[in-house]
């Protein structure tokens, strides 16, 4: 059984990536960093698995939805 994906907050993301807050939000806008997910009315966080994938290969990181679409496109 797979463990549930943890949600990490901004401070954890800052420490794990070494990026500044403004750089993270700029990269989100560019599509080169995982976007936040809403966890409450005033709170948001990131899926830990997305942050781990970004850390492993930040140059090639893309949202999973785009990866699935690319795979479908590639095989049609």
Image: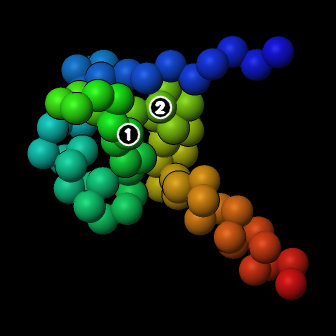
Q: Do we see residue 13 in this rendering? A: no
**Residue displayed at 43% across by 23% down:** 7
The image shows residue 44 at horizontal and vertical percentages of 28, 32
* Point 60% across, 53% down: residue: 64
Mark 2 burial class by Cα count in 10 Å: few <14, some 14-19, many 20+: some
Tell me if residue 42 can be seen: yes
Seen from this angle, which residue lies furthest front?
41
Where is the C terminus found, in terms of image quarters? bottom right
Total numbered badges shown on the rendered structure: 2
Q: Residue furthest right?
A: 75
| Quadrant showing the N terminus | top right
Res 51 label? none
- Residue 72 falls left or right of residue 59: right
> Which image quadrant is residue 17 in?
top left
Residue 27 in percent (x, y) is at 28, 55
Look at mark 1 in the image and give the residue it sits on.
37
Q: Tell me where residue 19 sits by quadrant.
A: top left
Measure how far apart labels 2 and 1 are at the Cα level: 8 Å
- Check contact, mark 2 vs mark 1: CB within 8 A: yes
In the rendered structure, find residue 47 and report the number of the disc placed on it.
2
Tell me how the rendering is colored: rainbow
């Amino acid at each position: 059984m797979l463990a549930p994906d943890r949600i990490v907050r901004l401070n954890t993301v800052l420490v794990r990536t070494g990026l500044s807050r403004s750089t993270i939000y700029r990269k989100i806008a560019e599509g080169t960093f995982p976007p936040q997910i809403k966890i409450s009315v005033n709170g948001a966080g990131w899926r830990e698995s997305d942050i781990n994938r970004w850390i492993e290969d930040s140059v090639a990181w893309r949202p999973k939805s785009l990866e699935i679409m690319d795979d479908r496109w590639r095989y049609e």
